[in-house]
Amino acid sequence: MNRTIFLSGSISADPDYIKKFEKWEKYWKSRNYTVYNPVKECQHIVDRAIIHSWSEEKLWLTSMVQCINIITNKVDNVFFISDWKISEGATGENYIANLLRKNIIHESELSD
C-alpha cells in the first residue's frame, strides 16, 4: 500500500481549520506519508473564486470535485479528523472513500 493520505474534516464550521489541518499534515508527514491537505489543495480554487466572484455554492462544489478527484486517483488512505461527521463535505468524502475501498483511519483510532 502506498503511503499517501488525504485529510478530511470540518472546514466551514471550524474557525481554526487551517491550524487543525496543518497539525495533521505535519503528523502524517513525520510518518513518511505524502499528504493531501484539502486546504492547500483547493487554494487555487479559492483564489479563482475571489477573482471571479463565485457564489459560496460554486466554490464549495468545485472544491468537492477537487477533493473527490484526489481521493479517487491519488491516495490509498483517508484520515478523518474527529469533527468530520458535522461536515457535509467530509461526510461525502467518507462515502466515496468507503465505496472505493480506501483504507480509512479515524483520529479516535490513533494511539499517539
Image (spheres, rainbow, N blue to C red):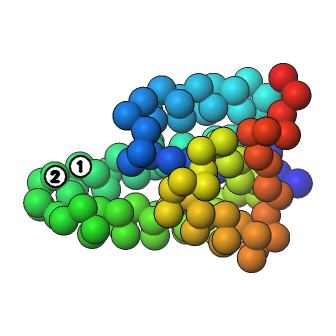
Residue 2 visible from this viewpoint: yes
Mark 1 secondary-structure assignment? helix
Disc 2 marks which amino acid? Answer: Ile
**Dot 2, crowdedness within 10 Å: few (<14), some or many (≥20)?**
few
Q: Is residue 38 left or right of residue 96?
A: left
Residue at 18%, 65% in the rendered image: 55
Q: Which mark is residue 50?
A: 2
**Dot 1, crowdedness within 10 Å: few (<14), some or many (≥20)?**
few
Residue position marked by numbered label 1 in the rendering? 47
Residue 8's spot in the image, x, y percent? Answer: 60, 50
In the image, farthest residue toward the bottom: 99
Mark 2 secondary-structure assignment? helix
Residue 73 visible from this viewpoint: no
Quarter of the image for residue 64 reads bottom left
Pick whichever, 71 or 80, lies toward us: 80
Quadrant of the rendering where the N terminus is positioned? bottom right
Q: Is residue 71 left or right of residue 88?
A: right
